[in-house]
Image (spheres, rainbow, N blue to C red):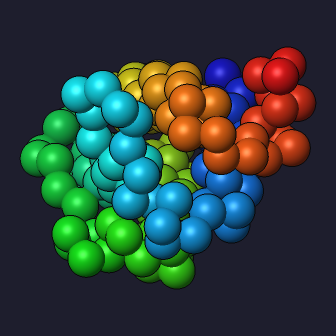
Amino acid sequence: MQKLLRDRLDQSFSLYDELASSLDGAQLRQKLPVPSNTLGEQLWCVIGSRESWARAIELGAWDAWGCSVDAAGVRDAEVMRGALLDSGRAVRASIEQAGDDEARSRLALELLEHECQHQGQILRYLLGLRIDVPEGWKRRFAL
């Protein structure tokens, strides 16, 4: 189970890394013409959640939500790329340290669910804003 969970998280992290590599600052500032936040703010939530769940996995229980990226960083493609990579590394490290602990595995599974929920939202943004969908996303979601 632990290997399967790590593999699925790695797959999710790779999708987000590919997406971040394809976006520029102007695209991060775009939002859908309905009540919504920006594409960058969607990724900000992914980053903050990774950082927060990594901390929770280390502790074995939920602590608090927080994100290292500030409002200016949300609009900066390089900052967002780096934060996605760093937050993915933090999650991997916390899972490796956790071993086969059920409570920590549940926390990692919750993070995976969160990642997947945002993937659906982000696909809606990409399609609605007419931003090219990265090839890995097309393959993963049969687009």
**Residue 120 % position (x, y):** 54, 23
The answer to whether residue 97 is left or right of residue 49 is right
Closer-to-camera residue (16/28): 28
Instruction: Reply above or below: 105 against 30.
Output: above
For image coordinates 28% across by 41% down, the residue present is 37
Quadrant of the image occupied by residue 72: bottom left
For image coordinates 33% across by 66% down, the residue present is 74
**Residue 84 % position (x, y):** 51, 63
Instruction: Reply above or below: 70 against 97.
Output: below
Closer-to-camera residue (95/123): 123
The answer to whether residue 110 is left or right of residue 138 is left
Answer whether residue 97 is visible to the viewer in this image.
no
Answer whether residue 77 is visible to the viewer in this image.
yes
Instruction: Reply above or below: 12 against 140.
Output: below
Quadrant of the image occupied by residue 94: bottom left
The C terminus, quarter of image = top right
Total labels: the figure holds 0
**Residue 40 % position (x, y):** 40, 56
The N terminus, quarter of image = top right
Quadrant of the image occupied by residue 67: bottom left
**Residue 100 % position (x, y):** 52, 34
For image coordinates 20% across by 37% down, the residue present is 61
